[in-house]
Image: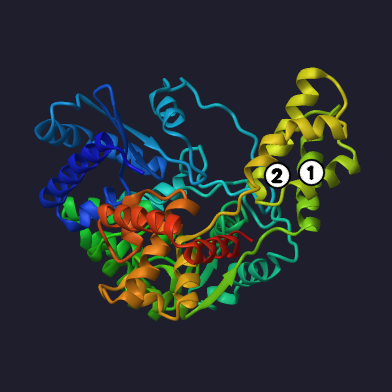
């Protein structure tokens, strides 16, 4: 629940965003500032957050001074602005500020990437090759990570269909487009990005033209071409390739950018060129995307990469440990320890990577053997972090709609009948208590409502729960259903 000071800070931030939208236009604002949120204002500093490092870097390089100038014109309480990257798992404000204020290292800290299906490395730290520079030019396609290939992808029951579809596309005879577009959707760390890179490597090895883009890079390329008045060249370059790969398509924002994305899809598909897409949810759930674009994405082959089963987790751990033994010959992990880790960590491949790194650190720094006891200590934080189920706002809306015999579109609509208002308020309340989303983000997910509407709904349901035991029992049942 917001205190008065925080409410005032939110109102100032809302005015700053309105002025940014008016100055920059709807497309540029939606592309770069639609996911910029206020975390807090402390000692004259406005702490803002974005979901990706790419957005942070772009806003700091091009718009930070403008944001600060608008803030200063609205309030004398803000003397500087700090932009940080918020975690999808959530962090408290203090930790976030420490991360954003920490001095940058002179050289990046080396990390150990898992050469397996779970190694979802978004981009390589290496500079693009000559081939990528000459192919992509001003388009700025991201480089393919050399570690993420079909050879390093570990196949199991949960990803077998996705792997088979990817392999078929990558080795299609004469480059013929099939399953077009091929659309993967999965949660974090389940291997969809690995498959995208593997397809790109295989197709590029055949001498065909490939561009791999994240949604952010696609938006950057389009907006930059508009500013430079080279949008025609941008479109021609993008449509003159053999394979277009786009990752995290759920982040594409802005009406004009979405229209161009839709035109690009149509042009490439009509020309028989292959498209591969990845997102964190199926096309029908991409509510921010234009309906025609969603329909086009759903028209190909849609494949879910589901959670890793225990056998696959065991294979990933075994492969990763064997790979490290080539570098650290004394690194030994027994089958009983591997079995324990595979049972304990179920969320995704990145947590498995973290577990292996912790075991390696213990073995190399202490010189002692890896036992079940030491493994339990080493991965304790990973086991604890994965326990709470991540509840999605879309799941809350669907369950509440079904429970109260209304449609999800009714909950998102402007209808204000009693039969719709109460379920909508309950869904907003559950979204606040069961997810890590901010009030503004919840408002956007409920038909573009203001955060004050969400706050009113939350307070109203909280008050009703203390007075109506039947409603309290009903809401508790909904919580259990969502968390099971």
* Closer-to-camera residue (203/280): 280
Image quadrant where one finds the C terminus:
bottom right
According to the picture, the residue beneath numbered tag 1 turns out to be 341
Secondary structure found at label 1: helix
| Contact (Cβ within 8 Å) of mark 1 with mark 2 | yes
Label 1: few (<14), some or many (≥20) within 10 Å? Answer: many
Image quadrant where one finds the N terminus:
top left
Q: Is residue 189 found left or right of 372 in the rendered image? A: left
* Closer-to-camera residue (232/48): 48
The answer to whether one can see residue 337 in this image is yes
| Residue at 72%, 47% in the rendered image | 345
Residue 4 percent coordinates (x, y): 25, 37
**Considering only vertical position in the picture, is 6 above or below 213?**
above
**C-alpha span from label 1 to label 2:** 8 Å
* Closer-to-camera residue (100/396): 396
**Considering only vertical position in the picture, is 370 above or below 215?**
above
| Residue at 85%, 47% in the rendered image | 339
Point out which mark residue 305 bears.
none
Compare marks 1 and 2 and give the one earlier in the sequence.
1
Q: Is residue 59 found left or right of 17 in the rendered image? A: right
Residue 270 percent coordinates (x, y): 38, 80
Q: Is residue 170 found left or right of 299 in the rendered image? A: right
Q: How does the figure colour the protein chain or chains?
A: rainbow
Q: Is residue 432 found left or right of 455 in the rendered image? A: right
Label 2: few (<14), some or many (≥20) within 10 Å? Answer: many
According to the picture, the residue beneath numbered tag 2 turns out to be 352
Residue 448 percent coordinates (x, y): 27, 62
């Amino acid at each position: 629940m917001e205190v008065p000071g925080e409410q005032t800070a939110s109102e100032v931030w809302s005015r700053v965003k309105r002025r940014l939208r008016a100055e920059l236009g709807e497309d540029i604002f939606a592309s770069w500032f639609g996911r910029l949120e206020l975390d807090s204002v402390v000692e004259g500093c406005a702490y803002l957050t974005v979901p990706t490092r790419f957005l942070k870097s772009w806003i700091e390089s091009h718009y930070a001074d403008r944001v600060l100038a608008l803030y200063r014109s609205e309030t004398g309480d803000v003397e500087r602005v700090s932009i940080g990257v918020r975690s999808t798992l959530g962090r408290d404000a203090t930790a976030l500020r420490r991360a954003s204020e920490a001095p940058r290292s002179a050289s990046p800290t080396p990390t150990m990437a898992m050469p397996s299906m779970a190694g979802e490395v978004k981009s390589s730290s290496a500079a693009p090759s000559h081939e990528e520079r000459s192919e992509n030019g001003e388009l700025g396609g991201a480089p393919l990570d050399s570690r993420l290939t079909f050879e390093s992808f570990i196949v199991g029951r949960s990803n077998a269909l996705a792997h088979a579809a990817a392999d078929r596309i990558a080795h299609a005879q004469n480059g013929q487009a099939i399953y077009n577009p091929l659309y993967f959707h999965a949660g974090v760390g389940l291997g969809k990005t690995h498959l995208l890179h593997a397809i790109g490597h295989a197709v590029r090895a055949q001498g065909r033209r490939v561009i791999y883009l994240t949604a952010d890079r696609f938006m950057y390329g389009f907006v930059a071409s508009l500013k430079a008045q080279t949008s025609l060249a941008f479109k021609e370059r993008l449509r003159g390739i053999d394979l277009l790969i786009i990752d995290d398509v759920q982040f594409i924002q802005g009406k004009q950018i979405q229209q161009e994305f839709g035109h690009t899809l149509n042009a490439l598909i009509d020309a028989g060129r292959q498209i591969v897409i990845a997102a964190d949810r199926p096309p029908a759930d991409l509510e921010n995307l234009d309906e025609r674009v969603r329909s086009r994405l759903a028209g190909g082959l849609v494949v879910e990469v589901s959670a890793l089963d225990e056998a696959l987790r065991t294979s990933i751990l075994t492969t990763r440990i064997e790979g490290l033994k080539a570098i650290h010959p004394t690194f030994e992990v027994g089958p009983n320890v591997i079995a324990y880790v595979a049972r304990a960590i179920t969320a995704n491949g990145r947590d498995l990577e973290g577990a292996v790194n912790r075991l390696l650190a213990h073995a190399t720094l202490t010189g002692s053997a890896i036992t079940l006891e030491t493994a339990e200590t080493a991965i304790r934080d990973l086991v604890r972090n994965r326990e709470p189920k991540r509840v999605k706002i879309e799941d809350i809306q669907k369950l509440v709609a079904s429970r109260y015999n209304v449609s999800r579109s009714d909950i998102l609509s402007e209808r204000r009948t009693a039969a719709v208002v109460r379920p909508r308020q309950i869904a907003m309340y559950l979204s606040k208590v069961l997810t890590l989303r901010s009030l503004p983000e919840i408002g956007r997910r409920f038909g573009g409502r203001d955060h004050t509407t969400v706050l009113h709904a939350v307070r109203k349901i909280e008050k009703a729960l203390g007075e109506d035991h039947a409603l309290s029992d009903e809401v508790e049942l909904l919580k259990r259903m969502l968390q099971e």
